[in-house]
Amino acid sequence: MDKGALMPSPDETCCVDGGGGSSFSSLRAYGRALAQTPRRLAARACAAASPGEEMSRVRARSGADMARALRWPDLVGLGLGGMVGAGVFVTTGRATRLYAGPAVVVSYAIAGLCALLSAFCYTEFAVDMPVAGGAFSYLRVTFGELAAFLTGANLIMEYVFSNAAVARSFTAYLGTAVGVDAPSKWRIAVPGLPKGFNEVDLVAVGVILLITVCICYSTKESSSLNMVLTAVHVLFIMFVIVMGFWRGDTRNLTRPADPEHNPGGFFPHGAAGVFNGAAMVYLSYIGYDAVSTMAEEVERPSRDIPIGVSGSVVLVTLLYCLMAASMSMLLPYDAIDTEAPFSGAFKGSSGWGWVSNVIGAGASLGILTSLMVAMLGQARYLCVIGRSGVMPAWLARVNPRTATPVNASAFLGVFTAALALFTELDILLNLVCIGTLFVFYMVANAVVYRRYVAAAEDDEEGRRRGAVPTLAFLLAFSLVALCFTLVWKLAPRGGARTGLLVACGAAAAAAVAAFRALVPQARRPELWGVPAMPWVPAASVFLNVFLLGSLDRPSYVRFGFFTAAAALVYVLYSVHASYDADEAAAALDGAKVLDEGCKV
């Protein structure tokens, strides 16, 4: 038999590379593809890949494998570097002054617990399916292609905007370290451009491009550099903590500077202030999710990932609580500078102004480490999105010499540098956060769904029996969490508000208990699983809904805009590229099966 007769046509095979398949070979072909959009959406939008497929056939589209060179100390270092950035120096002051007072220490402990719950959900997926896609891969095997694409696109957009904003803040903190208070002295004004886009920051561009070259060269070397920078940064933080306890006064923990106008005590604004403060400082923990994208490069995922992810969250929580305590001892909470709490506390002290320069140097190092970890993570997200066929496959290529996703790293590095060149910090920061919290919410839901819905592909009846009650529980629980959040934010203080909050909390707990008693788990993880299922992921869902409720209306408008833009890209390009790739892969698999039975 002629083997060539068994192979697919060139039109079928070219789409395996994901970018130039039969749907895009000509305008006429693209027109035919658009006419089939409803059918293709029905076939692909909810198509969930199997974990085995993600780790074999899909991963093979990158060509060379990523090097498994990371161990748990590397992951702890990456987690610390990703979370402990410059933002904590500002966030602590705002949460203390505006909400929690000295009890900001408790706010950080609560936020750390929330982060740990989410980290457990990420860890179960990363151990069971050690691929580089992070949340995108987890959602793709659980809820299907469309949900994964929309959340992944928002997450990458938030990474890019956040990294551009952080890079521009590097100029300001570096100036503080060397005694230049006005970052505009290091930026080039361009007349004629609108305000907010008229100051060129070459320092920020240089930092982004330098980090891009580093992460393209080697993941292991990038991790080693991050370890060194993080160690020095932690030493700066310990210096700030020691100075705060040495120079501080324990009476500031209970005594305001202006007792006539501001309440006193360790909890000046009560429990509400503590939880509102926790919602604000929780954003200081964002970064541990990037560690899960390194799972494909870890030597022993079942050992290294749980220690690396959870260990970094615990260590960061300890550092944050100590920082908050030291700052609360330096000044009464109502005298703290919300923009520069630590350096501001020392600037007013005779002979201690140099400490603010040290803080600026430490913050600069924190920016470098958080940038490096975030850029490592965003490149791996984009690499796996390219593997899945919904974006051009050249983004998925892994360089055989460096064993890193060079194309995705370089593309996002140049894009981020272009944004950081012109765009002002506050414009960028307004576009950050909601996408990340939404992804945390989705991953927590996904880990429950995957545990309680039959995993066997040929057991459609079992999947249907498990899917209906599980989806009903997740929807009802999210609605209860939303009701709690709305009551917390909108209802006036009083007995009625307290009663409604207690009722919502009791309803949430009853829903989890009933679901656990009535619906059996369909699968149990072989290596590592979230403890106390489904209580832990349910708590993560509840807390992430609460934190999402703390964001302002413009954040939701921007999130809706980006989601609509991503959906448009999916309808006009991604679903057709994915459909072509799936059809071509099926044709190749069928040809191989027939070929194995041939006698030539």
Image (cartoon, rainbow, N blue to C red):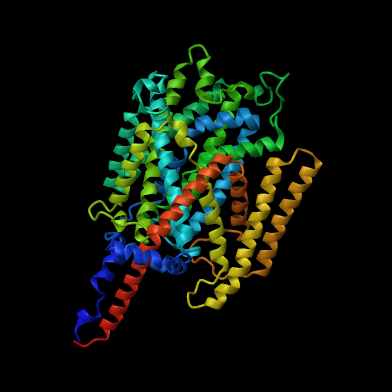
Query: Is 197 in front, or is 65?
Result: 197
Q: Quadrant of residue 569?
A: bottom left
Q: Residue furthest right?
A: 495
Task: For residue 43, say whether it is visible.
Answer: yes
Residue 258: image location, x then y, percent? 68, 18
Query: Is 118 in front, or is 309?
Result: 118
Residue 127: image location, x then y, percent? 45, 59
Reply above or below: 530 against 428: below
Quadrant containing the N terminus is bottom left
Residue 209: image location, x then y, percent? 30, 38
Reply above or below: 592 against 486: below
Report the number of discs: 0
Residue lying at 45% horizontally and 36% vertically, measured from the top left: 428
Query: Is 557 in front, or is 326?
Result: 557
Residue 106: image location, x then y, percent? 63, 37
Q: Quadrant of residue 600?
A: bottom left
Q: Residue furthest top?
A: 350
Reply above or below: 263 against 468: above
Task: For residue 300, say whether it is visible.
Answer: no
Q: Quadrant of residue 36?
A: bottom left
Tell whether 515 sits left or right of 143.
right
